[in-house]
Image (tube, rainbow, N blue to C red):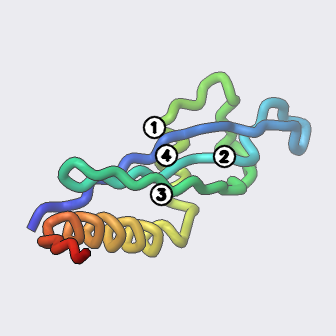
Amino acid sequence: MDLVNYTIKIDKIFSGNYNNLTDVAIRVDWTLLGTFRDLTYAMPQTINLTLPNGGEFIPLANLTDAIITSWIEQQFIALPDIKRIIENSLREQDAVRSLNVIERS
């Protein structure tokens, strides 16, 4: 059975000041993309990030997509459910297109 491949695409980062820190990433708009064969399904999401606590602060200028993606994977508890929704939709779309269609007049 072919696997669905998933990619997290960072769309927007919202930042602000928090506890005397500036340029703190507070919210991220992102899209989970699922691909199966030649089909793609995109599901936009938003996450309010856990705010820095002590020494774990990374300034906005130093954040990479890989860091933000790891935060999403750690903090977004609905991620497995959303992946299942995307997988089911992609497999259904793939199955439907393989059906024979008989037109009736």
Q: Is residue 21 left or right of residue 36?
A: right
Separation of residues labelled 3 and 4 (CA atoms) = 6 Å
What residue lies at 75% left-to-right and 39% top-to-bottom? 14
Above or below residue 17? Residue 80 is: below
For residue 15, which numbered disc appears in the image? Answer: none
What residue lies at 18% left-to-right and 52% top-to-bottom? 37
Q: What amino acid is labelled 3 in the image? A: Glu
Above or below residue 49? Residue 15 is: above
Q: Earlier in the sequence, mark 1 or mark 2?
A: 2
Separation of residues labelled 1 and 2 (CA atoms) = 13 Å
Q: What amino acid is labelled 1 in the image? A: Ala
Q: Position of residue 80 (x, y in %)?
A: 42, 71
Q: Secondary structure at mark 2?
A: strand
Observer-nearest of 98 and 68 = 98
**Disc 1 versus disc 2: nearer the observer:** 2
Q: Secondary structure at mark 4?
A: helix
Q: Secondary structure at mark 3?
A: helix
The residue identified by callout 4 is: 69
Separation of residues labelled 3 and 1 (CA atoms) = 10 Å
Q: Residue furthest top?
A: 61
- The answer to whether the residue labelled 1 contacts the one labelled 4, judged by CB atoms less than 8 Å apart, is yes
For residue 28, which numbered disc appears in the image? Answer: 2
Q: Is residue 14 left or right of residue 38?
A: right
Q: Is residue 64 left or right of residue 33?
A: right
